[in-house]
Image (cartoon, rainbow, N blue to C red):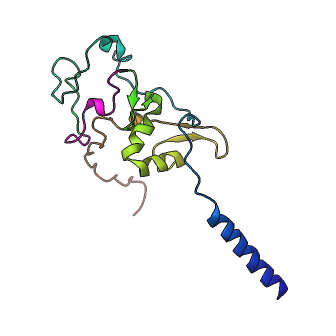
């Protein structure tokens, strides 16, 4: 009976200790380094400052007609526009809602602001592609390796007919 009482008391102390600890804070961006391949930039368009250096910032939402006119925004287009994600003063960077700049290699932080559940799953290796070892270094693909950031939904795929049973295999 003594052991049962001690075990219960130990469990109570452990439970109380866990409950008393403050919740852990998420890792700061500056401490986090995830290995990712370079983003899939369109050939000849990066670095963006090649064209945007010295160009005045125009924050007016509008249809682009001179450059980037091939981009069709279908990503919360009623509320979003280019400069909501692309940094207006440093076009070679993105920026978070707080205004903090992030590199294109850290674009998962930008996406994760609205898609937190997907970011959590991506970090765990459940969403997207992650390679490496369970307890060691890991390499991730960025959101933009699979999703077009301007139109992130996958296009529908036409169904194919069922495979035919080979003639040499009996039913």
Whether 6 is among the magenta residues is no
Residue 54 as seen in the image, left or right of residue 16:
left
- Residue 93 at what x, y percent from top left? 40, 25
Q: Eyeballing the image, is 97 above or below 55?
A: below
Q: Classify the position of the N terminus by image quarter.
A: bottom right
Instruction: Name the residue: 39% across, 40% down.
Output: 111
Residue 26 as seen in the image, left or right of residue 17:
left
Q: Eyeballing the image, is 27 above or below 162?
A: above
- Residue 61 at what x, y percent from top left? 18, 30
Could you say which is closer to the camera, residue 140 or residue 95? 95
**Magenta extent:** 75-89
- Residue 137 at what x, y percent from top left? 64, 38
Could you say which is closer to the camera, residue 76 or residue 23? 23
Could you say which is closer to the camera, residue 14 or residue 119? 14
Q: How many marks?
A: 0
Q: Residue furthest bottom?
A: 1
Whether 88 is among the magenta residues is yes
Instruction: Name the residue: 33% across, 17% down.
Output: 45
């Amino acid at each position: 009976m003594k052991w049962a009482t001690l075990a219960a008391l130990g469990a109570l102390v452990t439970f109380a200790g866990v409950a008393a600890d403050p919740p852990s804070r998420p890792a700061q961006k500056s401490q986090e380094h995830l290995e990712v391949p370079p983003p899939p930039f369109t050939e000849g368009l990066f670095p963006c400052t090649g064209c945007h250096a010295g160009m005045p910032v125009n924050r007016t939402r509008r249809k682009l007609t001179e450059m980037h006119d091939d981009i069709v925004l279908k990503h919360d287009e009623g509320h979003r526009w280019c400069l909501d994600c692309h940094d207006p003063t440093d076009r070679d960077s993105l920026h978070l809602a707080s205004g903090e700049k992030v590199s294109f290699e850290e674009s998962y932080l930008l996406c994760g602001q609205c898609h937190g559940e997907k970011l959590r799953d991506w970090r765990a290796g459940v969403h997207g592609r992650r390679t490496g070892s369970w307890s060691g270094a890991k390499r991730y693909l960025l959101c933009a390796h699979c999703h077009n950031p301007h139109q992130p939904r996958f296009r529908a795929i036409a169904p194919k007919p069922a495979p035919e049973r080979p003639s040499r295999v009996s039913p």
